[in-house]
Amino acid sequence: MKVSLIELFEETVRNHSQKIAVIDKDREITFSELRGLALELASEIIGLGVEQNKPVGVFLDKSIESVYADLGILYAGDFYMNLDIKTPAERIRNIIQLVEPALIISTARQIKPIEGIVPETVKVILLDEMDKRAEVDAVTILKRQLTIIDTDPSCIINTSGSTGTPKGVVLNHKSFFDFIDWALETFHFGDDLVMGSLSPIVFDIYSFELCMLMAKASTLVVLPAHLAAYD
């Protein structure tokens, strides 16, 4: 019985390594390549001393990078919290103060609007400045994966905060397993599923899309902003 979403993804990579996992405008990436980038990031997270079961913020637009960032966090045994790059900096400040993430993942360009509000205690990884030559700490990653239980958190989704400071809703691995089982039983998705990704990465439906990618080798197509359901 599987207890971690990464177990689903590992099985998918074994069976569909060369299938396209994400299409992002004129870029695409296979499941094998996506796994490689996620493992590199997981090793970087661990190398910075981030302990297991810690919240990690992702301040990226929806892209190949945001997908492997979320997967890398899960590989490290931590849980992701996607942040909206279009939201006012004050809202981001409130979320950071409330959740106290151990780390924020972004790029040199995208981090600029919130550079002044990230506390010194919060580490930052800029994907475009990572050392791609660094070795992956596969041993530690495996050790962490072996200690995960299904009630460990997998992500935080923040509410709209219309009544004040946004509240973080913590979802665990088991919740997504139940959601996946329901979706597959209801819709009978096959391994040929291609999903047009309409939702912002801060919405719960995006995490569902990510689950379909991990569980059913679904190809995720990142759609342009003007076609999205929310802007």
Image (cartoon, rainbow, N blue to C red):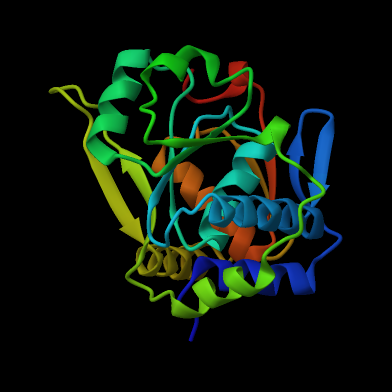
| Image coords of residue 15 (percent x, y) | 78, 73
> Residue at the location (49% across, 17% down)?
231
Image position of 204 (left or right of 229): left
**Direction from residue 20 to residue 196 in the image, left or right:** left
Q: Residue furthest left?
A: 163
Which residue: 21% across, 26% down? 161
Quadrant of the rendered structure where residue 189 is? bottom right
Classify 122 as above or below 90. Answer: below
Q: Position of residue 219 (x, y in %)?
A: 71, 50
Report the residue at 14% width, 22% height from top.
164
Expressed as whole percent of the image width and height from the top left, the position of residue 214 reads 61, 61
Q: Quadrant of residue 130?
A: top right
Residue nearest the observer in this picture, 148 or 200: 148
- Residue furthest to the bottom in view is 1
The answer to whether 70 is drawn above or below residue 4 in the figure is: above
229 or 59, nearer to the observer: 59
Q: Is residue 60 left or right of residue 84?
A: right
Q: Is residue 55 visible?
A: yes
Residue 186 vs 20, above or below: the answer is below
Residue drawn at (76%, 39%), measured in percent from left and top?
Answer: 23
Quarter occupied by residue 57 = top left
Q: Is residue 135 above or below residue 91?
A: below
- In this figure, what is the number of numbered marks? 0
Q: Looking at this view, is 56 or 20 the one in front?
A: 56
Q: Position of residue 100 (x, y in %)?
A: 30, 39
Residue 189, visible in the rendered structure: no
